[in-house]
Image (tube, rainbow, N blue to C red):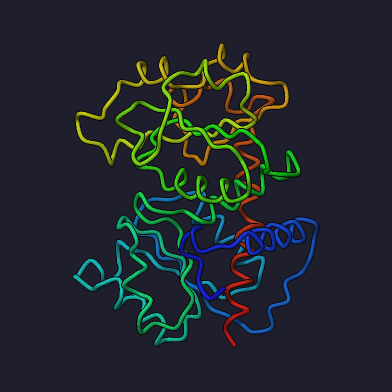
Amino acid sequence: MKHLLSMKNLQINEIETLLERALEFQQGAVSTLKNNFSIANLFFEPSTRTKMSFEMAERKLGLHVLPFDASTSSTIKGETLSDTVKTLEAIGVDAVVIRHKQDGYYNELLSGINLAIINGGDGSGQHPTQSLLDLYTIKEEFGKFKNLHITMVGDISHSRVAKSNAEALTKLGAHVTFLCPPQWQGDFASTSSWDEILPTTDVVMLLRVQHERHDSEMSFSKEQYHEEFGLTRERYEQLKQSAIIMHPAPFNRDVEIASELVESEKSRIFRQMHNGVYIRMAVLETVLKERK
């Protein structure tokens, strides 16, 4: 695996190998990387979990992490993303983790660039490492994917997490349902009724309302959204005993989820964050091993 760009590019055996390696890291395995690799994290959109999780994973692997701040880089002067990446390659960087507002930004980088690219999120496109840590969390809980009922709730059309997970979970044999306002369903068929999904759902995967990507016709008040589509205490009580709640975060309390439920018994939200470090270690190691 030279790059990690999209869940569409990963085969089932590659997903399973990454999940297994993440488990080994969680159990205390030491990386087999032999070179002193250098890496830079290029985040052109705000991030807490993804950026810090990658940095923790990189340090645990013993990588040299070059600091990069988009607000003080030459991109402010008009330098293209491609020229920025080529510059980093020229000074000896082996891999870059990139988050960018442009869907599929990586397509313009694949020609003429030899360093490894890991997609940390592209616009409303894909977020493969988030998907992998979600898969890891689900497998940790249920030991399987086949025939599980996964319900994704929220801003489906703008969610790179929804698109990445729908691709992967379907491939792995899970049943995926989307619950959202009709104008937020994008390319997916959806329902707008919680009553249809509450009794059978194994995983409720909540998604952040991405106001920054909306026009006025797509907006809801916080109270209206929570009442119609948020996970309330009443809905929580109707879930199966074995069901779990997930959210890629950041979460808006009392919008997508009642504040009291964020750390409830069924919630795995902070567990997902914990698992992200091991998944990103597995991804980084796998990609860097391709560089001789």
- 259 vs 110: above or below: above
Res. 83 image quadrant: bottom left
The residue at 77%/60% (across/down) is: 24
Q: Which sits in the foreground, 232 or 42?
A: 232
- 240 vs 288: above or below: above
Exactly how many numbered labels are in the figure?
0
Taking the image as shown, residue 110 lies to the left or right of residue 56, namely left
Q: Position of residue 92 (x, y in %)?
A: 46, 86
Q: Position of residue 76 (x, y in %)?
A: 22, 66
The residue at 58%/20% (across/down) is: 198
The residue at 62%/39% (across/down) is: 270
Quarter of the picture containing the N terminus is bottom right
Q: Which sits in the foreground, 71 or 238?
A: 238
Q: Position of residue 45 (x, y in %)?
A: 35, 54
Taking the image as shown, residue 193 lies to the left or right of residue 270, namely left
> Residue farthest to the top?
234
Q: Which sits in the foreground, 146 or 77?
A: 146
Quarter of the picture containing the C terminus is bottom right
- 191 vs 73: above or below: above
Taking the image as shown, residue 13 lies to the left or right of residue 254, namely right
The residue at 36%/16% (across/down) is: 223
Q: Position of residue 96 (x, y in %)?
A: 46, 71
